[in-house]
Image: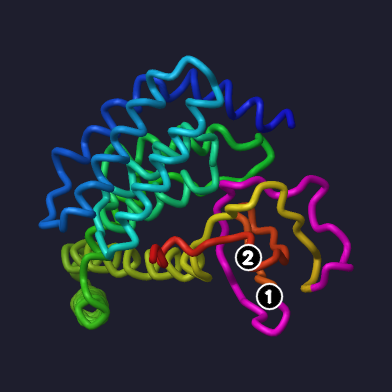
């Protein structure tokens, strides 16, 4: 109960100034030739959101935010893929205190456009509403930006470039040893360093991309040490809606998913308690 009250308080404090700008961006950036019914759903969603903002009673406010979330989600289920649309779903969900749906929608917006500013900003705010014990993904660092150019290359291009760098490095060192040329040795360090960048980046990708991204959408999800309802509880506290995890394995026969947290710990949860980031429809 304390977590939910904290979410309510922090939401009103942290996101009041973000909501209007985030929700209106849909009109500017989302363009689609829609049928009348789809256009009506979009208009109804914005109307519900506007009514929620103007409501003075909490019950009416929550009801309209939930309706706006539902209507925006209906539009997305028509096959509409737009970062602005998923950002609006997340913003309405966050105001409705559906933290799991909010984080999931912001993550889906960033799957479409990794640099979408409203989704990045609102996701950061949403993560701050989670309990302090919840491990969160490490935000992109300067090192990640340095490696980003390499990730833009195809696998074949990376392999070819890495092989070329290693060859140049080897030739440089061979020349320096054969003729004792210090300049050749010094020049050989440049392709060596670039080759090491490829190796380190490859190792980082392997360690961080294991599993499939997902978000816990059911609050107070009990994590177990194995795939059984009778297994001991994995953590002292239940998992909160909005927690981001990696799905390592799914037991279809028992409806259990093996997940890892961003601090390296793992657990088993009911598969119905999570949703994949890359499966919006």
Point out which mark residue 138 bears. Answer: none
Residues rendered magenta in the picture? 228-254
Query: On the rendered structure, is 164 left or right of 212?
Result: left
Q: Residue furthest top?
A: 56
Place of residue 143 in the rendered image (x, y in percent of width and height, measured from the top left): 36, 49
Kind of element beneath mark 2: helix
Residues at circles 1 and 2 in contact by the CB criterion of under 8 Å: yes
Q: Residue at x 33, y 49 (%)?
A: 86
Q: Categorize mark 2 by other alpha carbons within 10 Å: few (<14), some (14-19), many (20+).
A: few
Place of residue 262 in the rendered image (x, y in percent of width and height, measured from the top left): 59, 54
Query: On the rendered structure, is 109 left or right of 218?
Result: left
Considering depth in this image, is 135 or 176 the residue closer to the camera? 135
Q: Which residue is mark 1?
A: 255
Kind of element beneath mark 1: loop
Query: Is 234 part of what is drawn in magenta?
Result: yes
Q: Which residue is mark 2?
A: 272
Q: Residue at x 38, y 66 (%)?
A: 281
Q: Residue at x 89, y 68 (%)?
A: 230
Q: Quadrant of residue 163?
A: bottom left
Place of residue 194 in the rendered image (x, y in percent of width and height, measured from the top left): 26, 64
Lower sequence index among marks 1 and 2: 1
Considering depth in this image, is 41 or 178 the residue closer to the camera? 41
């Amino acid at each position: 109960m304390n977590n939910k009250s904290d979410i309510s308080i922090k939401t009103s404090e942290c996101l009041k100034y973000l909501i209007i700008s985030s929700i209106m961006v849909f009109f500017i950036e989302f363009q689609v030739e829609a049928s009348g019914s789809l256009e009506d759903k979009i208009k109804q969603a914005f109307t519900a959101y506007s009514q929620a903002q103007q409501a003075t009673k909490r019950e009416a406010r929550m009801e309209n935010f939930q309706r706006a979330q539902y209507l925006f989600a209906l539009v997305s289920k028509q096959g509409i893929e737009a970062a602005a649309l998923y950002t609006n779903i997340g913003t309405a969900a966050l105001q409705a205190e559906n933290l799991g749906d909010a984080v999931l929608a912001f993550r889906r917006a960033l799957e479409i456009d990794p640099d979408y500013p409203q989704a990045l900003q609102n996701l950061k705010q949403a993560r701050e509403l989670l309990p302090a014990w919840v491990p969160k993904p490490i935000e992109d660092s300067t090192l990640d930006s340095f490696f980003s150019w390499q990730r833009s290359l195809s696998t074949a291009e990376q392999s070819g470039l890495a092989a070329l760098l290693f060859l140049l490095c080897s030739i440089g060192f061979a020349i320096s040893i054969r003729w004792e040329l210090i300049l050749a040795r010094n020049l050989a360090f440049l392709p060596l360093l670039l080759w090491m960048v490829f190796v380190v980046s490859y190792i980082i990708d392997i360690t961080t991309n294991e599993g499939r991204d997902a978000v816990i959408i059911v609050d107070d999800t009990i994590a177990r040490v194995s795939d059984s309802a009778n297994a001991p509880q994995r953590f002292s506290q239940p998992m909160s809606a909005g927690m981001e995890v990696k799905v390592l394995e799914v037991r279809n026969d028992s409806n259990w998913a093996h997940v890892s947290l961003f601090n390296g710990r793992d657990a088993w949860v009911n598969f119905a308690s999570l949703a994949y980031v890359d499966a919006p429809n």
